[in-house]
Image (cartoon, rainbow, N blue to C red):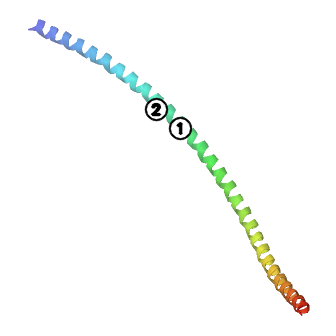
């Protein structure tokens, strides 16, 4: 009976050694995958940080440009309004003078 127990234990020991070796290989593979994932995650985080900082810079530049554009647009609109007043007044004066001259010429 002791012989059978010893053979059984030796066979079980051999199986456990094989399983242990397989688990060690799987563990190494998983550790390599984890290192790769962590490295990609870190580099991705750096890329995201850079993209965010560039986005913030671009947004600030856009907002500053928009403020300048709005100021210039307001100035242009004011000039257009003034020029329309001047043109309409000038056109009326011109039409009056033209009509006076036309009346003078009529026979």
Instruction: Give the answer, above or below, for where 25 lies relative to 60.
Output: above
Instruction: Count the labels in the image.
Output: 2
Q: Position of residue 74 (x, y in %)?
A: 74, 70
Q: Is residue 57 left or right of residue 30?
A: right
Query: Could you tell me which residue is drawn at 32 percent across and 16 percent down?
Result: 21
Which quadrant holds residue 98? Answer: bottom right
Q: Earlier in the sequence, mark 2 or mark 1?
A: 2
State the CA–CA distance, disc 2 to disc 1.
10 Å
Q: Is residue 69 left or right of residue 9?
A: right
Query: Could you tell me which residue is drawn at 39 percent across and 23 percent down?
Result: 29
Mark 2 crowdedness (10 Å alpha carbons): few <14, some 14-19, many ≥20: few
Q: Is residue 87 left or right of residue 5?
A: right
Q: Position of residue 73 (x, y in %)?
A: 73, 67
Q: Which sits in the foreground, 106 or 75?
A: 106
Q: Position of residue 68 (x, y in %)?
A: 74, 62
Q: Are marks 2 and 1 in contact (CB under 8 Å)?
A: no
Query: Could you tell me which residue is drawn at 61 percent across and 42 percent down?
Result: 50
Q: Can you name the residue that lies furthest to the front here?
A: 107
Q: Can you name the residue that lies furthest to the left here?
A: 1
Look at the numbered disc 2 and give the secondary structure of its residue: helix
Quadrant in which the N terminus appears? top left
Residue 37's disc is: 2
Q: Which residue is mark 1?
A: 44
Q: Position of residue 85 (x, y in %)?
A: 79, 81
Look at the numbered disc 1 and give the secondary structure of its residue: helix
Q: Is residue 2 left or right of residue 105?
A: left
Which quadrant holds residue 90? Answer: bottom right
């Amino acid at each position: 009976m002791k012989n059978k127990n010893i053979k059984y234990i030796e066979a079980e020991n051999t199986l456990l050694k094989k399983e242990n070796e397989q688990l060690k290989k799987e563990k190494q593979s998983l550790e390599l995958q984890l290192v790769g994932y962590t490295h990609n995650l870190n580099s991705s985080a750096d890329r995201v940080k850079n993209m965010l900082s560039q986005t913030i810079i671009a947004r600030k530049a856009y907002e500053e440009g928009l403020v300048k554009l709005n100021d210039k647009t307001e100035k242009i609109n004011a000039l257009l309004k003034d020029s329309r007043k001047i043109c309409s007044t000038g056109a009326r004066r011109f039409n009056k003078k033209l009509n006076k001259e036309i009346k003078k010429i009529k026979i």
